Amino acid sequence: MTAVIQAQGLGKRYGRRWALTDCTLDIPAGRVVGLVGPNGAGKTTLLNLTTGMLPPTSGSIRVLGGRPAANPAQLAKVGYVAQDAPTYAGLSVADHLRLGARLNPGWDDALARDRIGRLDLDPAHKAGKLSGGQRAQLALTLGIAKRPELLVLDEPVAALDPLARREFLQSLMEAVAEHELSVVLSSHLVSDLEWACDYLIVLVDSRVQAAGEVAELLATHQRLSGPRRDLARLPADQHVVVASHTDRQTTLIIRTDAPIHDPAWTVSQLSLEDLVLAYMGKPTHTAPTGRNHRPTLEVQR
Amino acid sequence: MTWLTWRQFRAAAAMMFAALAALAAVLALTGPGLADDYATGIAACTTQGGGCSDFAGLFFNDHQGPFLAVTAVVLLLPALIGLFWGAPLITRELEAGTHRLVWNQSITRTRWLAVKLALTGLAAMTAAGLGSLAVTWWSSPIDKAAHTFNFPKMAPLLFDTRGIVPIAYAAFAFALGVTVGMLVRRTLPAMAITLAVFVTVQFAVPLLVRPHLLPSTRSTIQITESNLEDFNFDADRLRVSAKAADTGAWVLSSHTVDASGHTVDTIPVSMSSGPCAPSGPPEQTLSACLAEIKRLGYRQQVTYQPSSRFWPFQWYETGIYTAPTLGLAGFCFRRIRRRS
């Protein structure tokens, strides 16, 4: 199966600040990829590099086998719903569909009209007068009706209330199932992504901290708690993501492929949210005590 | 892409062309009457003899208001196009974030920019061309009389607002606005910078470039009653100047020179005695005094661009503005490929 996104040492610098460094990814097709990380971690930068909105400063990226935005054929293969779902405020819903039809050779007009009808959007309505949720749906309609192979969405639900959020993600998932899209969507909330994604990328401080199938990530990460001990004495195949200590107790989140045999540890499963928060350097059960809690490990595959 | 560009631009285009149509209608209604008045007046003063400069002066004076108004329209049109069509062309998309929508349709940015630049740029040039054409036609009788109020055809103001140069100015202002917008990325600062740069260029070109497009003509002429421009005494020093015969010429410099060809500021003749002393009717004194000046060898040396060079200069200047216009457009294409 071909890779949807292949990045090698990808980096982007704005002035002297690196918004993304040393990003290496190989994402297979047919996945719904969640890109999660705190605000300012570099999520939008990575998505802009994926869609060719920005050229990389270092490294390389190939999307569906081609250079992003290199030519009309490449552009036709990737749909992008950018942050805040930009639309032309002065143009009506119908104008937007016409825009899509004029600018995309693969435009599926029946699909677009059907979606607009189901969403109860008035075609004569100006996009500037739509609610946030309606605007997001209009932008998503444009993204889907161009019939891309990969749909990229940058914080598509950030500005929506919980109900609109759910509706949006549901209609996205329906479209994914119907058209066999690969999807990358970003959020700073794991809960948005948890039920939709089967692949996860955790991006913190301009670096990919973890990337992989959700099931595999959950299987290889454990929480260990037990009497206080020196981290240097852990087995070599146990990589500490976060460690926190009290006077008598040590709690670790580790990544390991091997089973845990040490009877001193109490081993517990992590939720996806725990896992992501661990990489973000914010353990869920103890407050961080300083910069020591920065992630110490990169998982790349 | 043409459809989208037109859809975004049509309101601005409609406003511009409605305003131009209104102006053209007014000019079309009043133009023939104006031309008739001028032709009749010239015919009358020619048959009466004695020259037509008095009629020209009166004619210009009567129509000075509308003349200046339509000239101002053509003068401002390119700047307005640069400000309101050029600068926001890209910045409006960047500010609203809509570039992220349109750049992700199945069309390259280069093509997107090409259509936007071509369509809006052509509209800009058409608007300036129509405006200049209408004003050039309507104002031609007034322009012929305008030298009496020191608005010769070749000099800045009339030269810049007649013929084909307004088209080149509009294209340049538009390209400048787009480029500045692309660099500054915000509409209001882009408009301010566009205006500042365009105004600077519009002053710099007639001051520094246009006088040297062709070598200027220098002629040394006798100061006579018919070409006398200025005649005044200051104690025992006389200051005179004379006009070139070519009334439409753009005079770059004009000095009084003495018999050996040196520039003099004033002519040392006595006002209390001799031919320049007031005695008898003023006309007699003047002609006697001018004869004395001639005898002493004083003449007027005028350096100018003759009015016969109007069209060559129009073409040269169009070329001079076209080169940077194309350069700016090329810069926009290079820039949009490299950056968002």
Image (spheres, coloured by chain):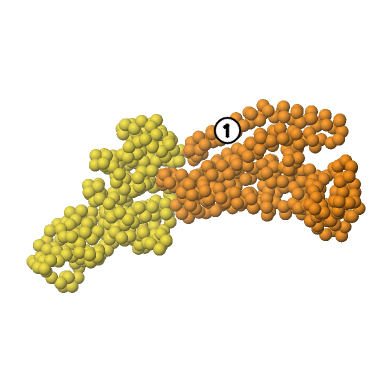
Chain colours: A yellow, B orange
Residue B312 visible at all: no
Q: Position of residue B114 (x, y in %)?
A: 53, 46
Residue at numbered disc 1: B19
User: Is residue B149 rendered to the left or right of residue B103?
Assistant: right
Residue A231 visible at all: yes
Total residue callouts: 1
* Depicted A43 relative to depicted A96: above or below: below
Residue type (three-letter) at the residue carrying disc 1 = Ala
* Depicted A90 relative to depicted A240: above or below: above
* Depicted B70 relative to depicted A237: above or below: above
Q: Quadrant of residue A177?
A: top left
Q: Residue at x 28, y 53 (%)?
A: A36
* Depicted B62 relative to depicted A13: above or below: above
Q: Which of A286 and A107 is in front in this view?
A: A286
Q: Which residue is drawn at 50% across and 44% down?
A: B89
User: Is residue B154 rendered to the left or right of residue B10?
Assistant: right
Classify mark 1: helix, strand or loop.
Answer: helix
Mark 1 neighbour density, 10 Å: few (under 14) some (14–19) many (20 or more): few
What residue occupies the far left of the structure in this picture? Answer: A263
Q: Quadrant of residue B269?
A: bottom right
Label 1 marks a residue whose chain is: B
User: Is residue B87 rendered to the left or right of residue B23?
Assistant: left
Q: Position of residue A245 (x, y in %)?
A: 14, 66
Q: Position of residue B58 (x, y in %)?
A: 75, 34
User: Is residue A184 rendered to the left or right of residue B128?
Assistant: left
Q: Position of residue B66 (x, y in %)?
A: 66, 34
Q: Which residue is drawn at 24% across and 65% down?
A: A291
